[in-house]
Image: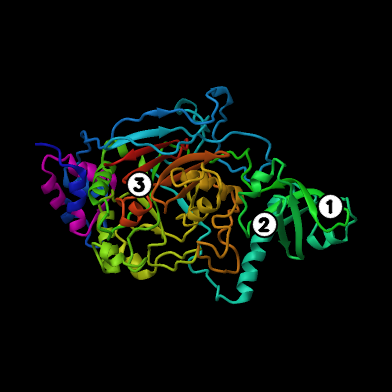
Amino acid sequence: MPLEPPVRVVRELTSRGYNAEREAVTLLANADEPAAAVERAVDIAPSDALTLTVDHVREAVGGAESRGPTASGAGGSVAESPSGESASAANTPSSRGNNSHDNQDTGGRSPGETTGVETGAEESTKVDSGTGSASQQRTRDANADADAGHQNLDIAGDITGESTGTGEYKDFVATFRDRYERLSKKLRGRVNHRPTDALHSMPGGSEAATVGMVNDVRSTASGHWLVELEDTNGVFPVLVMKDRDIAAHVDELLTDEVIAVEGSLSSDGGILFVDELYFPDIPRTHEPNTADRHVQAALVSDVHVGSQEFAGREWTTFADWLHTEEADPVEYLLVAGDMVEGVGVYPGQDEELDIVDIYEQYETFAEHLKDVPGDMEIVMIPGNHDTVRLAEPQPAFDDELRDIMSAHDATITGNPSTVTVEGVDILMYHGVSIDEVIAEHPGEDVSYDAPHKAMEQLLKKRHVAPQFGGRTRLAPEKEDYLVIDEVPDVFHTGHVHKLGVGGYHNVRLVNSGCWQHQTAFQESVNIQPDVATAPILDLDTLDVTVRKFR
């Protein structure tokens, strides 16, 4: 008889209240009589079991372990040459399993990048990481103790349960002081820093440098740039002449970010003429961590269940593909926010909802999540459409919503969070501030068609939402949870519904598109969303294969 598609087996099990290990699903699907095998496996399982194991299923099917063919749901990979990368294998560093965060910025290479792809239904496009080809991934330690069947993840930087902000003045002071202290440490090694009060006492014409938070940026009558920098001691004006090469960097500045400048004081000592300008930035010599085995993670975001435009058919195709043999290495699913469309997010939204009750939206999302293989590790952070506070950092979902989405025992954490998967540090941030970076940046290369270019700016500033009081709602806390302290290996965002894959100083950048067809608002502003895209990250090489399920 024909083999039963694994996804049907999973749906049958979930209808009975069970999850199952991936190999258990395969055994059931390959049984001579899958339906009868499911019945026997359910009968054999202990009454308190929530997940059917391989042992339960082997007993049910009489010890059969054969694995038959499964239907492939995606096409082959098309190799793309990395933009701006050397093709020479001799210049490709081997991947390492250790961090070298904040190394001296003395040259190096960026992973390859693409501004997105337009491929046919269920096709894929591969983007190389720049950290080595498949045959040059790494020289593995012969004594490596990584267990090929062991999934491993950890969470850092989660605001959940740690929020203490009350909105009082002292909370704002604490946030900005913490931001300044942490980012200034990354800059003081590059310049001979003097606090602002010391600059005021130095004689005119002296060489000087300082680290400060951008308080104001304005142009002079002559077209030069006057920047006010603030530290814990006061404010000092610095001038960037319009004919200097660094003048282009002034256009990138956002208020409240931390930078360093060096140059010379005016004759009266009242202003600093800038010769060099520095951002906290990612060291060019950053060497990313990689997994010790071939394992992959699917990076998705912006599912928007509850919207009339939710791409439900495409999601089902994606979930079916995850059950195929081709998707066996995909053991992790990382969802970067906006699981549901939400209610009351914008005026008139109720007219565009397919599900008008917020809890029903999450219940429906949970049903779609059940289509994913039961043994897959899932990590989820909230977005601006989810039922958490809008101000960032956002705590994770409350207990009631966690219970609704408990089918897979997913790891639910705040926005942003750093998720360490198989030793690879993945900074997950929903990405609301990308709107602000695109709006403020003068260059045409930083746009909605290339969201990874805006992500580069955030890494350069070492902060996921630098500008306070702009488009992004920010909450004052005892510390600034939005500072990018440690260099991530992968930066994963969503929000803008556009696909972008690239690299910056050997950090892999992924904005993962969406699962919502074009809305009326997007049509009014001529935004064509990248729908049903699932970038698949090789954790052992940081290569990305973009799969589309349309």
State the predominant SS element of the stretch in magenta: helix
Task: Give the amino acid at mark 1.
Answer: Leu
For marks 3 and 1 on the same chain, the one whose residue lies earlier in the sequence: 1
Q: Residue 30 in the image: state x and y as whole percent.
A: 18, 39
* Residue at the disc numbered 1: 265
Query: Bounds of the magenta span?
Result: 13-40
* Residue at the disc numbered 3: 528
Would residue 431 be found to the left or right of residue 92 on screen? Answer: left
Task: Give the amino acid at mark 3.
Answer: Gln
Q: Secondary structure at mark 3?
A: loop
The residue positioned 37% from the left and 51% from the top of the image is 377
Task: Give the amino acid at mark 2.
Answer: Arg
Question: Is residue 328 among what the camera can see?
Answer: no
The residue positioned 37% from the left and 66% from the top of the image is 345
Estimate the spatial distance between the alpha carbons at disc 3 and disc 2, rounded to whole Å: 35 Å
Answer with the quarter of the image where residue 4 lies.
top left
Q: Residue furthest left?
A: 1
Classify mark 2: residues with Cα within 10 Å, few (<14), some (14-19) or many (20+). few
What quarter of the picture does the N terminus occupy? top left
Classify mark 3: residues with Cα within 10 Å, few (<14), some (14-19) or many (20+). some
Answer with the quarter of the image where residue 68 lies.
top left
Q: Residue furthest front?
A: 221
Residue 386 is inside the magenta segment: no
Question: Is residue 526 among what the camera can see?
Answer: yes
For marks 1 and 2 on the same chain, the one whose residue lies earlier in the sequence: 2
